[in-house]
Amino acid sequence: MQVATEDVVAVHQLYGRQSHAIDSGDAAGWAATFTADGEFRSPTYPEPATGTAELTAFAERFHAAGEHLRHVVSTIHVRPGATPDTLRADAYLQIVASTHLVRLTVLDDELARTGGGWRVRRRTVHRDS
Amino acid sequence: MQVATEDVVAVHQLYGRQSHAIDSGDAAGWAATFTADGEFRSPTYPEPATGTAELTAFAERFHAAGEHLRHVVSTIHVRPGATPDTLRADAYLQIVASTHLVRLTVLDDELARTGGGWRVRRRTVHRDS
Amino acid sequence: MQVATEDVVAVHQLYGRQSHAIDSGDAAGWAATFTADGEFRSPTYPEPATGTAELTAFAERFHAAGEHLRHVVSTIHVRPGATPDTLRADAYLQIVASTHLVRLTVLDDELARTGGGWRVRRRTVHRDS
């Protein structure tokens, strides 16, 4: 079973928009790339962030931390999900400072179709070592 | 408003072609990824390069500098432009040497539809710190 | 001549799937992204690996080496091949450890259409200096 061309491209667009949102300090824009009940889990942080309000607050804290970091996404593979309205995606995310690689993480996402297009429903970040 | 699938993919192709052109020393090929009146602005260089002749000369100087660098493009987000025949794109560009990250820059592009497909009309490079 | 949108996206998917396969230790899955007579050449290794059995063994040795590395693919440019059923692709591949860039290589691939979709028929890896 193959993911449709337009869905793969929509996921590439979603990831591009998402990284540029958080890196430019647009916390609401970043939260809006998740579903309303979206979930963000990462070993970097003790607690998951769930739902638009917590996700927005998470992105605001990230930006307020002041270090100027970039979320570099690549090597995207979009897979069918459990239902026709879900997808899975694997990708590499390198969080980098200007000239120093800060960390490399792997995204394990579940995406869901909404009236506004594909959104991340659940993100589980796997951190290397 | 959404950018059409084929236009997003055309921009990915354009960026791929563009990086490989300048990195392989194909200065004319790199300049040809801009419109005939295309403009390149970067904080790395004192003056913008405008139009095919200046862009070609710019790419020739880059290559002649002799350091073997790679233009790694990722995290592309293609947005609608001011008119149906323009698009905007955000992307990350890491300029890297073999094993050393030289710098990370952000592309802020305006693209225009031409008889030969999408081309960069104006590139403004934002350099991190 | 332009490569069709769905073929470009299929190549992006293939590369995503391929990297995640070898990085997760799925040697057979990685070999399956090549044609049955697929070939892998790289200056990092003395001999090419040819055909599914050798490719699988290659990926098993890579994983057994134990260092946890990531194949980060970006800057993909898909070009027409010599026949309608072949394509060429240029891309950047950065092989990275958690926080250290191990090496940067350039993929020069020939892909072929099979009953199961596009597959790498021949991969020649160019290593930077």
Image (cartoon, coloured by chain):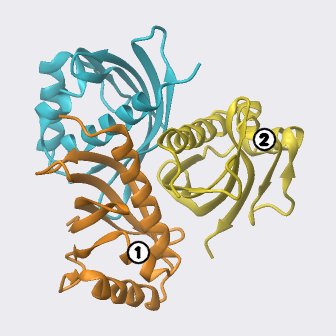
Chain colours: A cyan, B orange, C yellow
In the picture, measured across the screen, residue C126 lies left or right of residue A102, that is right
- Report the residue that reaches farthest toward the top: A83
Q: Do badges 2 and 1 share one subunit? A: no
Q: Residues within 10 Å of mark 1 (few under 14, many from 20)?
A: many
- Residue where numbered disc 2 is placed: C35
How many marks on residues? 2
Task: Indicate the secondary structure of the residue bearing disc 2.
Answer: strand
Q: Is the residue A81 above or below the residue C121 in the image?
A: above
Q: For the point 34% across and 16% down, which residue is it?
A: A112
- Amino acid type at circle 1 is Trp
Residue closer to the observer: C95 or C90: C90
x, y percent for residue B95: 40, 68
Residue closer to the observer: A12 or C2: C2
Q: Where residue A8 is drawn, which disc sits there?
A: none
- Amino acid type at circle 2 is Thr
Quarter assignment of residue C24 = top right
x, y percent for residue B30: 41, 75
Q: For the point 60% across and 56% down, which residue is it?
A: C80
In the picture, measured across the screen, residue A1 lies left or right of residue B22, that is right
x, y percent for residue A56: 13, 27
Image quarter hosting the C terminus of chain C: bottom right
- Residue where numbered disc 1 is placed: B30
Q: For the point 35% across and 90% down, which residue is it?
A: B57
Residue A125 appears in the figure: no
In the picture, measured across the screen, residue C29 lies left or right of residue C9, that is right
Residue A14 appears in the figure: yes
Q: Is the residue A26 above or below the residue C101 in the image?
A: above
Circle 1 chain:
B
Circle 2 chain:
C
Task: Indicate the secondary structure of the residue bearing disc 1.
Answer: helix
Q: For the point 56% across and 23% down, which residue is it?
A: A2
